[in-house]
Structure formats: C-alpha cells, structure tokens
Amino acid sequence: MSIRVGVSIAAIFITALLVFGNVQAAPIHLQIDPQKSDIKATVADPLAKLRETGEIEATLRIISGNVDGDTQNPGATGHIKLIIDATSFDSGNSHRDHVVLGTALDTAEYQTISFESTHLENVQIDVPGKLGHVIVVGNLTLHGTTREIRVPADVSLDSDGTLSGDGEVSFDYTDFGVRVPRLLFALPAGKDVTIHFHVIAERANSARVSQTAHP
C-alpha cells in the first residue's frame, strides 16, 4: 500500500531540479538524503467507527535516489530514480504490519519499490530560483507491476543549493496487484492510499549527503 509513497517523492525531486536549474550551471546531479526525507501513507481504517481517527498511517524508508537534468532543457532532460524499502512498512502496530508485509505487499518476494521519471508537465515557476510547481510523470514499480503515474509537487531551493519537495497523491493500490489487507475481525482496509511526502536532495558531492546516506 504505502509503497507508492516512494514514487511520489521521487517525482517531486525531479521537478525541483528542473524548475530551479537556472540557478546553477548545467548539468545538475543531486542525491536524495534518506535521513532527511519523510514518506507517509494513509488508508481508511476498517475500525474507524471504534477509533477517534478514520485513517491508518504508515511510514516507508528510502534506500537511495538521484535527480539529474540539464538546466537549459529541464522538461526534456530532467530525470529521477528512487528506490524504496518495502520491508520498512511501519504503522506502529506489529500485528497490522505483519499482515500488510506478508499478505498485501508480499515483501518476501517484492522487497523494493522503484520510481523512474519519464518527463515533466506543467512546470510553473512562482519565484525564479526559489519556488515552483510541476507534475512529474513516470513509472512506478510496485509488487512486480509497473504503471505510469502523475505526481504534483511543490518545490523550493535553499541558498545552499538544497532542494526540498512536498506533495500528496492518491490512488487505488490494487491496480498494482496489491491485495487489500484484512485486519481485526477480517475487516478489509480501504483500497485507496494517499501518499504524503517531504523529500530533501543535495549535491552528490556534498559531505552532508555522504554522511547521512551512508551512516
């Protein structure tokens, strides 16, 4: 279910790189920092009537990711690849996590989730070199199935060249062959998942990135 979170995040970073490329000389190569990036997925809670909240929230860990592009032609050359650890699914409930990992995500066979962009759409620059918005189009591979997705992202660029991306995207995870997990009393969780993401990308030769990416 939450695997798609990783895909959304990857898309966001690509957008950021392309939108703000005019600030630096082309080409650009950034590395996503797993320690500073957050991915969260939410689905409808089958026991919503018995709880204060109607959603279940889980997190996933980014393994690695890169953002590349030519600042002179970001729409055509912008590219991002992101790898997510499917086995890192964590909702804060060990029983629920066991069910999701074993019977829904099938992590014994599908241990990673990946996203690779193909192009950008509707690139909008709100503040030149600082703020922008874009739709990242790419292929998400989840549970052994690859499908195209479109991810809207808001991006910003700090004075030190660090890119940050934030956004949210929803979809039906059963389109990827992921089974709807049944939890307590055999009640099914919701089929639609919403991915919330906050991603940080820095220059690949940055000491900070090297240290956080390889603790």
Image (cartoon, grey):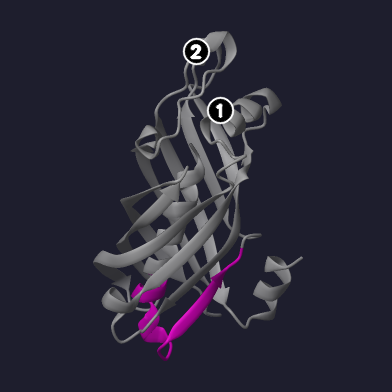
Name the outermost residue toward the left. 122
Neighbours of disc 1 within 10 Å: few (<14), some (14-19), many (20+): some
Rendering quarter of residue 118: bottom left
User: Mark 1, mark 2: which one is toward the viewer?
Assistant: 1
Above or below 22: residue 109: above
Above or below 11: residue 104: above
Q: Which residue is at 34% across, 53% downward? A: 151
Q: Which residue is at 58% across, 79% downward? A: 204
Element class at badge 1: helix
- Residue interval drawn in magenta: 16-33
**What label does residue 103 carry, if any?**
1
Name the outermost residue toward the bottom. 25
Q: Which residue is mark 2?
A: 187
How many numbered circles are shown?
2
CA gap, disc 1 and disc 2: 14 Å
Q: Which residue is at 56% across, 8% downward? A: 185
Element class at badge 2: loop
Q: Is residue 159 magenta?
A: no
Rendering quarter of residue 17: bottom left
